[in-house]
Amino acid sequence: MPPIAKLDDTPEMVTKYGFDTQEQPAIITHKKGNLTIGIPREKTFQEHRVALTPESVGLLVHNGNRVLIETGAGKFSHFSDREYSEAGAEICYDAKELYKCDIIIKVTPPMLEEVEMFRENQTIFSPLHLPTMKTKTIQKMMEKKVTAIAYEYLQDEWGVYPVVRSMSEIAGNSVILIASELLSNISGGSGILLGGVSGIPSTRVVVLGAGVVGETAVRAALGLGANVKVFDNSTYKLHRLQNNIGTRIYTSVLSPTLLSQELENADVVIGAIHSKKGRTPIVISESMVMKMKPNAVIIDVSIDQGGCFETSEMTNHDKPTFVKHDVIHYCVPNIASRVSRTASIAMSNILTNLLLQLIQVGGIKSLVKSSKGVRNGAYLFGGNVTNAHFSNMLGEKHIDLDLLFFDEF
């Protein structure tokens, strides 16, 4: 456990203990007692990540904040209560006490039983996961005038979605390792080595989506020697991927005819299409899946937004696959939870910087007002719906925060 640095040592701590991905460390000089931050133990099935690491907690506490963490919250990411305690956190054995904090930081969307413990005018940072979010849960949050920021829509000053990008990089690397295992005889696959060896044709991998997941998966697949083809409707993304990869690979827009032909010969198909708002569009029909080779593998990374294959059904880490039309489907939504420690550190780096900004500007309202990226991530503000797509789903009116704060800019 690293020592807690003095305030003027903060930049050195940031670089030394895992925050070097941040452009500029925030140095906070506000008086002590700025915020109380609560980190609950995740109760969602098979969620092993924790929102903040002990190092992040130490930085926040040393800058004048109270951090409460529920006992066992870091267990599955291999962070002990003792590490958090030594970093300055207060170990909480009663979840009701933790939910009295000003700000709640979660890895998964809030559940109804958690929202019941919320107090009025509370702030929560968490994913939204629209396809799985219960209307009753949102209504209860609205009743309690909660301000809620969704990781999926949170942007930085360059317009990048930092949490999505970080988890996408992890997912992109993971899916190739998963595909490699699913192709083996042990997993019921066709006994193919992903990538192949000299004298044997390379494994054929089709990637749908040229975003961060797609690009990371392409890099990993090419590294193993696979034959990779990428489809995306954005020619800009395809061009960017070609440049970033640094080698010429097959790319195409989502032409149904070309796509159907490639699927028939594919050994692995990875669905990595991300929707900025709402459900991911279905680009692969059931009839297209039926034409694929027996024991081919589908990995639908888009399943947390509904999935981009018509045959996709959400699975879990205990039973991650099912077979439909002789094709193996892997549709686990929280792939990053397979490598929970890496994912927790990556998420903590982003959230710590965000919390330090919040302290610096003087509260959530000031942060939402001053940061367009945070404003984009807000789907509830003081209990009011602020996301247009979300309001359509709920049948509620929404408030445009840009208009709400217009006179204050």
Image (cartoon, rainbow, N blue to C red):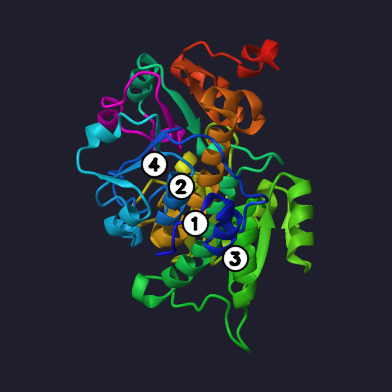
* Mark toward the viewer: 4 or 3: 4
Per the picture, the main secondary structure of the magenta-coloured stretch is loop
Q: Are marks 4 and 1 in contact (CB under 8 Å)?
A: no
Question: Of the numbered discs in the image, which one, if any, rests on residue 108?
Answer: 4
Q: Which residue is mark 3?
A: 205
Image position, residue 24 (x, y; %): 66, 49
Q: Are marks 1 and 2 in contact (CB under 8 Å)?
A: yes
**Disc 4 versus disc 2: distance between alpha carbons?**
27 Å
Asked if one can make out residue 220 in the rendered structure from this viewpoint, the answer is yes
Question: What residue is shown with label 1?
Answer: 5
Give the residue type at disc 3: Val
- Upstream in the sequence, badge 1 or badge 2? 1
Q: Would residue 384 be found to the left or right of residue 199 on screen? A: left
Closer to the eye: label 4 or 2:
2
Residue 213 shown left or right of residue 409 in the figure: left
Quarter occupied by the N terminus: bottom left
Q: Which residue is mark 2?
A: 62
| Residue 312 marker | none
N-terminal label among 4 and 3 = 4
Q: Residue at x 46, y 13 (%)?
A: 395
